[in-house]
Image (tube, rainbow, N blue to C red):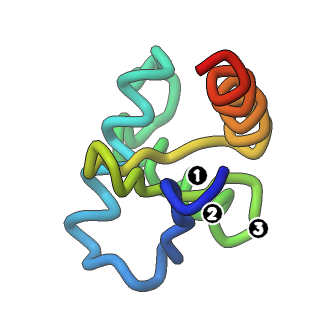
Amino acid sequence: MGERFIEVPYRMLPAETLDALLEAFVTRQGYDTSDTEQGMTGWTAQLKRQLENGELLIAHDLETETTEVMTLAQWRAFGRDLADDEEEG
């Protein structure tokens, strides 16, 4: 994905920032926050475990200055879509 995107190690982020990113991911993915006993906190705890296990990653777009949490499948699909766009352009 060239030099536009970088992976951000989640351990480098302040706890509040990481929680905000994870909450945005939960909301964007349409998770039911009433599914866990702890609501949003339960989801963010699960996502932190997934980050620790390498199932999720945090990517920063240097061009748009946005940061997103992605699954590995989303990251790979995003890379393919981006490569297709670059070939067309």
Q: Locate residue 6, reporting x and y percent.
A: 53, 65
Residue kind at label 2, given as amino acid type = Leu
Q: Earlier in the sequence, mark 1 or mark 2?
A: 1
Quarter-wise, where is residue 82 in the image?
top right
Badge 1: how crowded within 10 Å, few (<14), some, or many (20+)? few
Q: Earlier in the sequence, mark 3 or mark 1?
A: 1
**Residue 46's disc number:** 1
Residue drawn at (52%, 56%), measured in percent from left and top?
Answer: 5
Q: Locate residue 77, reporting x and y percent.
A: 75, 29
Between marks 3 and 1, how big is the CA–CA gap? Answer: 11 Å
Report whether 21 appears left or right of 2.
left
**Residue 53's disc number:** 3
**Residue 51's disc number:** 2
Badge 3: how crowded within 10 Å, few (<14), some, or many (20+)? few
Whether tag 3 and tag 1 are in contact, CB under 8 A, the answer is: no
Q: Quadrant of the C terminus?
A: top right
- Residue at the extreme front of the image, as rendered: 89
Residue drawn at (36%, 51%), measured in percent from left and top?
Answer: 67
Residue kind at label 1, given as amino acid type = Gln
Report whether 54 appears left or right of 36.
right
Residue drawn at (33%, 48%), measured in percent from left and top?
Answer: 63
Tag 2, which secondary structure? helix
Badge 2: how crowded within 10 Å, few (<14), some, or many (20+)? some
